[in-house]
Image: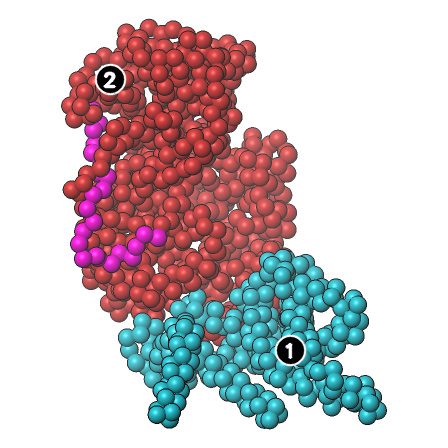
Chain colours: A cyan, B red
Amino acid sequence: MNKTLGIIWRNVRKVEYILFLAPSFLGITIFFLLPFLDTVRRSFYDVRGVNFIGWESYISVVNNAAFRLAATNTARFVAICIPLLVVISLVTALLVRAIKPYGGIFKTSFLLPMAVPVASIVLLWQVVFGGFMRSDTAFWVLVFTYLWKNTGYNMILWLAGLDSISDTLYEAANVDGASRMQSFRYITLPCLLPTFGIVSILSLLYSFRVFREAYLVAGAYPHDSMYLLQHLFNNWFQNLDISRLSAAATMMAAVLLVIIILMRGFFDDKED
Amino acid sequence: MKFLMLAIVMVVFAACGENEGNGTPTASPAMGRYVEVDITPPNAEGRLINLITQDDVLLVFDEGLRTRFESNDMGVSWTQSLGPGHDNDRFETVFNAGILPDGRLLVYLQGEGIVSVEQDGTTAHFPISSIDEGIADGEEFNVSLFHVLDDERIMLVYGIDWIARIMRENQAEEEGGERAEGGERTTNVRVGGRFGGGGGGMGLGMSGITTAIYSLITGQQTELVSYDEFFRINPMGANTYGDIFAIENHNLVRHESNGDVDILLHGTAFAFGAPTVINSSVQPIADGFIVNVMHTGLFKYIWDADAYVDPAQTITIWSLEDSPFVRAAITEVWRNNPNAEIIYEIALGDTGVSAADAVRTLNTRLLSGRGPDILILDGTPIDSYVERGMLLDIFDSVDTSGVYQSILTPFTNNGQMNVIPTQFLIPVLMGAQENLYKTPTLSALVQAVVEGNPLPSIEDGRMLGGIPEEERAKIAFNDLAELFDIMWQANAAAFISDNQLNSDVLYDFLYAIEAIRNKYELPQRDEMMAGGVFMAVSASGGGRTNPIGGSIMRYVMQSTNIAAFEASNLMLLASFMGRDGSEIMPFPGMVQGAWTPSAIVGISADTAVADFAIEFVNTMLSPNVQNINHGVGLPVTRDAMQWQIAQINEQMEEFNLSPFTLNMDALIAQLQTPALPETTLREMVWNTVERLDSIEGAVQEIEQNIRNYLAERS
């Protein structure tokens, strides 16, 4: 009797889980999954979605010089920006904690870039960096924009991670005669690994949002050094080159998925 | 200067983009809509004035108040009698009137103010304090609303008509008389005429708009009504609630006293929305409206519950910008299909979106299968739409038999045609034959400019009065943008071939621009326009006027030997070629026979009303649409070209002027290369030209910028 009740109870719990998950799953399905599947489908059809064209779009995309440049620039941007952002925001978080009585002021000031409207940023950037936008320096302006905009938010994430580390660990280490550097190396860093995972994945995703500033500052065809995949996608959409756009988007999503899975795997291993 | 009108032309092109549907036929027709009934009294001539008495009698007076028409059934039947102006010309300038409870008319007469008019033409001054004071100070007024509220009050909307004052003073000077001052009455004059605002001049140059209520007994203002200052173009009507009705931007709108503005009837389907109409007045009646469409007729709009919209004749037309030509086609299609619903979407109307955003929105709609049925593709990536199969092949369904072959050929490919231009423009040079012969190529033109005389500054009094021929500059432009525009249209097709940039062509292009810019020290922005001065030339029979570019303006003012512009208005060519025996030749660009297609139309491959869409395109090519000169493009059919020329020559003969003899067929036969509206490339080059320091540097920059643009297309 008790066994039967237990089975029923477990099934009721399963239904509960499903019901709780259903709204978000439905939302993700409607707004992300289905459109993405439609994008994958479109990558194998002509623009009007009538004629099957197989891998033609993928082959064309891979052979396209604009795609190769945009993909290289995007990869370069991600490879430079994410480590920089992770390190700078962590250092900022540690500094803010170190000067605790005044930390609140700095915390607010670092978050301000998130509140500044894009239009104002663009205007300022055009005035300040206008002269650099037609040279290789344009790429570094973009990197600076990304760091300036996102450091504050990541700093908050790091601070939350730092706050979650129990003081007793530091006290015990102190009693054992550990130096501050040793505490940081053997307590802080390992305990921040879960936060590191979240910060890294979010930073990766933010890196694709810098296009807005890039587009508004330099238009649809910026200097070669800051010509990103989103520029290409935007222009292909403008020209109704939907098959190639879909193929490129599918490829990019696949690469991102692989990176995120690898990162999750790495951090899960470390946490274990 | 005989044919010119110097004026600020307050022409507000309609921007009434709507997103009401996609043209997909619905299961059942929608019932009920406003229907238009032509109630123009028979024998009525010229400009009409319509009024409604307190007894609901509809009165109409024709031009000059010569004839009075009366209808007791709101326009179904009419009786005719002599009007107050049947034996005099005192009321020639009257374009609007009110009616007092005792049946007398109220009109505004220049130099006199408001007068009451008896049936026999007897007038008496009708005191309205503000207007009388203004006239005493030498002002002229334009009264756009006389609305008698009751036995004691009248609502007036009026403004200072400074054009009328200038014209009056000019006429007084020409007649050797003194300038009118201190309210002294001078001869009545008509603003407008052949090259001006043909609708009698109303609405041109009004300022200081006042809406106020006055006592009919004392003439004193009793109340100032605070409507917004939008009332300036057309005569208006009002109802007993104080709502004011007017035709604005081709739509019938209601202004409430609280400032709310509603569009009651969209003009695309009605006579007052026709692009040739520049003035209409509205009178609300119990079951609808009466609209007096200037120079067209009197129309009644009443709700017909049984009328329906045919789903098979419901189409959506999309264009980036408003086009009087498209509006003319809509009017014509609607006239032939009264149960049709035609929705005209203007992407860059009053929404503030960029052209690129508008195209992206269009693409989204097309991909979702909910796009417009007909696309006017000017300013869009036409090749993309064609290459991706988004447009129907209209080769066999559209009648192109009357279209010039040189216009048609670039748009047909192996028996397939997806788009067709329904208007076109030609970049040309105008000047005396001996001057044109010296500029057969772009480099010769540039050399002639560089070696020629400089252009006098705008402050030089001779700029407006003419300069001796030997001292004139070769050619001139008001600003860099005007120079770039004409150069672009004449050369754009040479920049890219086989998806490669031709750097040599680009170099020559930039060199020419730099040389001309430096010679004349062209400003970035037009100083004359900034000063509020430009010329306009009439286009259609309805009196629409089009401003003309600085190059031709300076040529006409006799400060240059040659004018460069895009020929889009035969009336303009006829008006200015008659002077000094001017000739026309294609602008000497780096491609042979460059021309600019315009009103390029295509039909969405996903349309559910293909037959009706084809009818629409055929209508765009029909005589009733092609024959109208809107001043924004030349007709693509030979018959329409000849018809327009014949019309112009009739007018020339009327004014004892030389006929327009330019052989358009020969000119059009030289056309070979259409400059497709490639906006991205144009923007790239223009951005470089704007800050042009070194030609080599600019070429390098464009080469670099364009690399990805071209690579994307490979």
Q: Residue at x 44, y 16 (%)?
A: B214
Vertically, is B294 above or below B216?
below
Q: Residue at x 18, y 20 (%)?
A: B72
Estimate the x, y position of residue A125 in percent, counting from the top left. 66, 62
Vertically, is B95 above or below B217?
below
SS under mark 1 = helix
Q: Is residue B530 left or right of residue B342?
A: right
Q: Residue at x 24, y 67 (%)?
A: B415
Q: Is residue B192 visible?
A: no
Q: Which residue is mark 1?
A: A81
* Marked residue chain, label 2: B
Which of these two is toward me, B408 or B368?
B368
Q: Quadrant of the C terminus of chain B?
A: bottom left
User: Given the image, on which type of amino acid does mark 1 rest?
Assistant: Cys
Magenta residues span B19-41
Q: Which residue is mark 2?
A: B55
On whether residue B583 falls in the magenta region, the answer is no
Estimate the x, y position of residue B499 in percent, counting from the top left. 45, 72
Q: Residue furthest front?
A: A1
Residues under numbered marks 1 and 2 in contact, where contact means CB atoms less than 8 Å apart: no
Which of these two is toward me, A40 or B153?
B153
User: Given the image, on which type of amino acid does mark 2 rest?
Assistant: Asp
* Marked residue chain, label 1: A
